[in-house]
Image: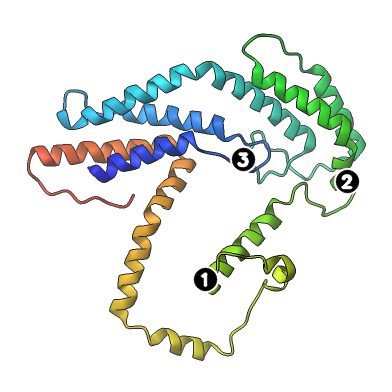
């Protein structure tokens, strides 16, 4: 039961500090929506049961935070809708989490994209005291489009040129992690010089690699494999939480309820990894 409550607190902390480097994705808005899913999941807790008192205290705090930030979240959501319109004009790749997604089969020219962006900026009209995020976003969009708009449209004229460099940064990020794991050093400055040459490596033979693997005793391998699986549980929980927050929290609360009932009847309970 303590582990379940720990996961719930971890889900709440993750919602507060959630962020993303992907274009047109805002961590604050996603964190607020994750808190909403947590609040809906905590409603399943049994109110009169003493073992569910902690869950109801969590729910009260989550509801307080949601109510306090509802106006800001609505402003942020409308600002994010403006970003989605910008993404539609730019025909951002369908691999993004944006909705609606624009297929890349429709070839457009940079001139057409520029005209649509100018039309969108002129159509957006904001007025009000609680539209700070929208006003600041629109001001930044107008300024940067005026200064750098023409330099952002080469990808529509050059075939195969991506609209961002996220995949390239992700590739070199994996290289840095592998370099730290293999060498044991924190610094990865060497990758700045010859990182592009470390894409692939080859072994002398598969038989030699198999012989080295078979030297490890099976109990030792199973022991370290179990330790690795246990260490990966928090990361797996966060991935499930980001994929479907409401379903993940509902599963945790259901397990908490089953655990409370098992304790009340003195019956054994096995905590699964899901």
Q: Quadrant of the N terminus?
A: top left
Give the mark nearer the N terminus: 1 vs 2. Answer: 2
The picture places residue 266, in percent across and down from the top left corner, at: 7, 43
Task: Residue lying at the far left in this picture: please name it.
Answer: 266
Give the mark nearer the N terminus: 2 vs 3. Answer: 3
On screen, residue 74 above or below 249? above
On screen, residue 192 above or below 104? below
The picture places residue 25, in percent across and down from the top left corner, at: 63, 36
Specify the label residue 97 is tagged with. Answer: 3
Q: Residue at x 25, y 41 (%)?
A: 255
The picture places residue 164, in percent across and down from the top left corner, at: 75, 48
Specify the label residue 184 is tagged with. Answer: 1
Quarter of the image holding residue 221?
bottom left
Q: Nearer the viewer, residue 180 or 204?
A: 180
| Left or right for 90, reference 75 | right
Give the mark nearer the N terminus: 1 vs 3. Answer: 3
Q: Secondary structure at mark 3?
A: loop
| Left or right for 8, reference 26 | left
Report the mark closest to the observer, 1 or 2: 1
Neighbours of disc 2 within 10 Å: few (<14), some (14-19), many (20+): some
Mark 1–mark 3 Cα distance, whole angstroms, equals: 35 Å
Q: Residue at x 72, y 44 (%)?
A: 93
| Left or right for 206, reference 153 | left
Q: Secondary structure at mark 2?
A: helix
Task: Identify the residue under disc 2.
Answer: 154
Contact, CB < 8 Å: mark 1 with mark 2?
no
Neighbours of disc 1 within 10 Å: few (<14), some (14-19), many (20+): few
Q: Secondary structure at mark 1?
A: loop
The picture places residue 196, in percent across and down from the top left corner, at: 73, 69
Neighbours of disc 3 within 10 Å: few (<14), some (14-19), many (20+): few
Q: Residue at x 56, y 63 (%)?
A: 177
Mark 1–mark 2 Cα distance, whole angstroms, equals: 41 Å
């Amino acid at each position: 039961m303590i582990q379940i409550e720990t996961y719930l607190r971890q889900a709440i902390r993750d919602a507060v500090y959630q962020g993303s480097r992907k274009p047109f994705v805002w961590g604050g808005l996603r964190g607020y929506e994750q808190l909403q899913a947590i609040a809906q999941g905590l409603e399943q807790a049994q109110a009169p049961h003493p073992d569910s008192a902690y869950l109801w205290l969590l729910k009260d705090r989550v509801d307080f935070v949601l109510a306090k930030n509802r106006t800001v979240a609505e402003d942020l959501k409308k600002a994010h809708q403006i970003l989605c319109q910008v993404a539609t004009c730019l025909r951002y790749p369908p691999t993004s989490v944006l909705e609606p997604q624009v297929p890349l089969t429709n070839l457009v020219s940079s001139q057409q994209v520029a005209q649509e962006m100018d039309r969108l900026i002129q159509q957006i009209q904001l007025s009000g005291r609680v539209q700070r995020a929208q006003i600041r976003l629109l001001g930044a969009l107008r300024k940067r489009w005026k200064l750098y708009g023409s330099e952002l449209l080469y990808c529509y004229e050059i075939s195969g040129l991506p609209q961002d460099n996220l995949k390239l940064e992700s590739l070199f990020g994996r290289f840095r992690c592998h370099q730290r794991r293999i060498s044991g050093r924190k610094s990865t400055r060497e990758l700045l010089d010859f990182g592009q040459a470390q894409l692939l490596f080859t072994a002398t033979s598969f038989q030699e690699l198999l012989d080295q693997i078979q030297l490890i005793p099976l109990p030792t391998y199973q022991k370290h494999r179990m330790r690795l699986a246990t260490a990966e549980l928090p990361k797996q929980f966060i991935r499930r939480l980001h994929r479907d927050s409401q379903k993940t929290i509902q599963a945790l609360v259901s397990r908490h309820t089953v655990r409370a009932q098992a304790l009340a009847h003195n019956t054994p309970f096995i905590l699964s990894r899901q």
